Image (tube, rainbow, N blue to C red):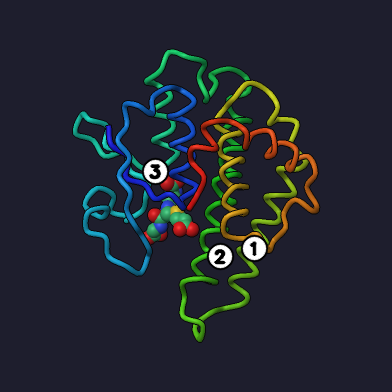
Amino acid sequence: MQLIYAAASPFARKVRVLAHETSLLERIELLDTAVLPTTLNERVNALNPLGKIPVLLNGEGEALYDSRVICEYLDTLHQGQKLLPEGASRWQVLRLAALADGLMDAALLARYERGVRPEQLRWAAWLDGQLGKVQRALAELERQAAQLQGPLDLAQIGVACALGYLDFRFADLDWRAAHPRLTAFQQAFALRASMQASEPV
Ligand code: 99T
């Protein structure tokens, strides 16, 4: 299999962490590529019309996207404990994973607004709106931090990658200040080899 990814992408990091944790990483060749909404990337566009990464070439002729689909797919390929549980906790895990993805989406839009859009075109209300989503998602994750304690699952991976992205692109937000339980979660989770091997650059 091949994973089209970028080291800065928290979405691709989720996939890499999941692959590492499930011992699938050695079956995946990592192909680094740069993507931006303002730059045509023909290779990525040919695989994913949305022009976004990550994309997984599954070795059976299919290009899979987005990160959530890839994670679900990889979770079917290993015999260990499933990271997307089938039991009663499934919907809670999926909802928390969606919240983490939404945090990443909003942070990424804020990143494009703040770091990519030409200065004279920047729209403060848009940036504030996206950062408001980030703050509300953080507050909800803090409330639900107890749900991040059990056996490893997709929600924990998503939340850890979302927080790692804030550290990478939004250090000025100082998200730890008002979120002690999330801080403790992140501190412990960041020690995993899968997280250390996938630090954003
Ligand atoms: O929006 C674009 O055209 C290009 N952006 C991306 O491909 C980003 C890279 S993170 N990926 C996504 O937005 C994927 C979202 C999708 N729902 C998924 O896979 O879950 C780049 C981060 C950075 O450089 O700061």
User: Which quadrant of the picture is home to ligand 1?
Assistant: bottom left
- Identify the amino acid type marked 3: Asp
Helix, strand or loop status at disc 3: loop
Q: Residue at x 33, y 49 (%)?
A: 32
Q: Residue at x 67, y 50 (%)?
A: 137
Instruction: Work out whether mark 2 precedes mark 1 in sequence or the reverse, and give the earlier one.
Output: 2
Instruction: Work out whether mark 1 precedes mark 3 in sequence or the reverse, and give the earlier one.
Output: 3
Is 139 on the left-hand or right-hand side of 57? right
Q: Residue at x 31, y 26 (%)?
A: 27
- Identify the amino acid type marked 1: Leu
Q: Quadrant of residue 170?
A: bottom right
Q: Quadrant of residue 69?
A: top left
Q: Which of pointers 3 and 2 indicates the residue nearer the eye? A: 2
Is 11 on the left-hand or right-hand side of 24? right
Q: Position of residue 194 (x, y in %)?
A: 51, 32
- The residue singled out by tag 2 in the image is 110
Ligand 1 has an atom within 8 Å of the beta carbon of the residue at disc 3: yes
Which numbered dot is residue 131? 1
Question: For mark 1, does the 10 Å Cα neighbourhood hold few (<14), some (14 to 19), or many (20 or more) residues?
Answer: many
Quadrant (top left, top right, bottom left, bottom right) of the N terminus:
top left
Ligand 1 has an atom within 8 Å of the beta carbon of the residue at disc 2: no
- The residue singled out by tag 3 in the image is 66
